[in-house]
Amino acid sequence: MLYDLELIKVGKIYDNGTPAVVDFDLAVVKGEFIAFLGPSGCGKTTTLRMIAGFEQISSGTIRVRGSAINDLPPERRPTSMIFQNYALFPHMTVRRNIGYGLEVKGLSAKQRAAKVDHLLATLSLEDVADKRPDKLSGGQRQRIALARGLAVEPEILLLDEPLGALDANLRKTIQAELKILQKTLGITFVFVTHAQSEALSLSDRIVVMNQGRIEQISPPHQLYTRPDTPFVARFIGRNTILDGTVKGVVGDQVLLETALGSLSGRANGPLVGGQAAKIVIPAEAMEARAAGPAGPVSRSSVNVVGATVRRSDVVGHVSHIAVALPTGTPVALEGHVDKYPPDAFPAGGDIVLTWKAAEATVIPAA
Amino acid sequence: MTMTALSDGLAEARIEQPKPQRTTLWLVLPGVLWMTLFLVLPMLMMVYVSFWTQTTFAITPVLTTKSWVNFFSSDTYLTALWTTIRIWLTVLAATLLVGYPTALFVGLFVRNKTLQTVLLVLCVIPFWTSFLIRVLAWRPMLGKEGAINLVLQGLHLTSAPIEALLFSELSVVIGMTQIYCVFMVGPIAFMLGRIDPNVLEAARDLGAGFGRIFRTIILPLSMPGVVVGAIFVSVMVLGEFATSAALSGRKVNLLGNIIVTQVGSLKWAFAAVVGVVLTVIMGVVVAALLRVVDLRKEL
């Protein structure tokens, strides 16, 4: 299979010896929307800049459509980069900014104008075509940067936190536009972000990075339901993570001995009896009910732990209940007021939390 | 982004700001008084005096155009005018030729701010000694038995000393270029240092090589620095007299030298004429340079 973009054991070691990126492996098919997600300093921007050619790679290979581009300078790579601060040419009009790449390619003024006009129309920038970018709003400049990058018809568009500098409302709008644009053009987008919501709503697959290494590559919802590593479990979503020791494995079900008793979940990764492991329970999977004599029916597929309510609030029609497990671990639950009437969960009250084993994930501790 | 947000904020603030109060106008009074007394009045006086009647030993406030006619009908003075313009243009070109690459290196390729400051301070080191010393120091460098000639002969590159090095127009140009170059380097390096490195990367990303990036991005964005540097150098070179006096062996007469001579022999009216001519030239040069870029917009 011919991949649009392949990174094979790509590594980057800074001049002072610190490794920035270690053994990065990724294969992207044409038209995929990939997000690099991770905390700042995790190596996501460095990886993007290695693809663009602004950072030398220390080891490994980068291929675009099967041919290695390791030794090509940025100006000869079939990629376009959208910079976080847009990096527009401040002394040129919007039109000339967008046409710059075409000017470089040696297109005639007429050919350039046709292409630029088309892009101006696509991104609704006609009204500002002859203005300088510094006079324009963040959203407009963002679109100019996109138009300028797309004008050269790159195989791959690289975006470095392109929405970071926009306010929350505008970010939502541009997110939607970006997604539509990407689907329409059908080209591969690689997108760097530290904002989960952006990565989750935009991408086909997310590469979660931490300290220069890939933690997990998977479609957005799988990061929630099947985290591969403790880091992903902590970083994505709102999970309760408990330490334990594997007692037994039956099929994909694992029984884990924890401080709160025996708990079960689905195995993710190789697990054997006696091994230290963690059980990851998404907040969405947990149900709260008042503890009482008519307590819950215990079934092997359902986990039950006791907890204490710390606080409960209602915001609009959503109840937020903050509870604490006997270990002291806080858990935040939310649900419709009909499900969790505020008076049913008074602060200080004892409740039980239940979840289905299939919705919890057990992963190796290391 | 933040810059725009900031300037947007400033623009709004400006609209909301009340007009300057009458009381705040007092703040500019000392400055206005100073400039009126010591710049505007003297200049008006200079124009006035240039029309006074000059005799060998006295000057009387009787209006005449004699000094003006004298200036524009004398070969000596017109030659001095031409020499001044020629030397100014040569020095301007030389400072730009030496200064721009230096500024390019310091402002753009040295991205370490500390090193950048160190390099700029190095450019200013000659200023730790007085102007006259810096000029006179060229004599033992350029002279017949000076350092350059000794080295050239020592290396057997020349058999006889090159005499044209000192007491010629060349020595004046060399001296001025060295003295004024830093005024060109400073503003250009400042503008180059403000170029966002991402902007240059974006251009590369779009396929542009260094030559094109220099032509289409670096040069236009540094133009305000070039213009400010050119204004500094022009104004100083046009008013020069000391360098030519010290290094030309009286062979190069600039308008500045003529003023000095005329004032020395108490020919006030004639000195005033030359002063007015020089002032007009400087005014035209500065105005022309300011037309190249809109500094208010760029800085």
Image: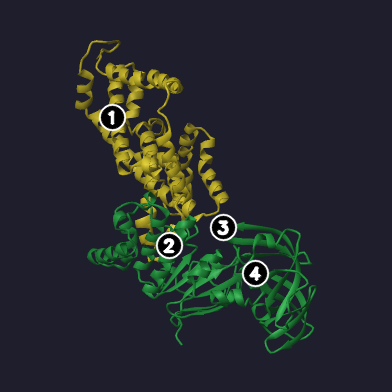
Residue corresponding to mark 3: A316
The chain identifier of the residue carrying mark 4 reads A
The spot of residue A346 in percent (x, y) is 72, 59
Mark 3 or 2, nearer chain start: 2
Q: Are marks 4 and 3 on the same chain?
A: yes
Residue mark closest to the camera, 1 vs 2: 2
The chain identifier of the residue carrying mark 2 reads A
Task: Give the side of residue A361 with respect to residue A158, left or right.
Answer: right
Secondary structure, mark 1, is helix
The spot of residue B144 in percent (x, y) is 43, 41
Residue corresponding to mark 2: A174
Please tell me the numbered disc located at residue B228: none
> Quick check: A26 above or below A148?
below
Distance of label 3 from label 1 (alpha carbons) = 76 Å
Q: Do labels 4 and 1 touch, CB within 8 Å? A: no
Q: Callout 1, which amino acid?
A: Val
Task: Name the quadrant containing residue B284.
Answer: top left
Residue mark closest to the camera, 4 vs 2: 4
Q: Do labels 3 and 1 touch, CB within 8 Å? A: no
Q: Callout 3, which amino acid?
A: Gly
> Quick check: B146 above or below B270?
below
Distance of label 4 from label 2 (alpha carbons) = 29 Å
Residue corresponding to mark 1: B280
Residue at 53% x, 40% y is B125
Task: Give the side of residue B177 with respect to residue A310, left or right.
Answer: left
Distance of label 3 from label 2 (alpha carbons) = 28 Å
Q: Is residue A273 visible?
A: yes
Q: Are marks 4 and 1 on the same chain?
A: no
Q: Do labels 4 and 3 touch, CB within 8 Å? A: no
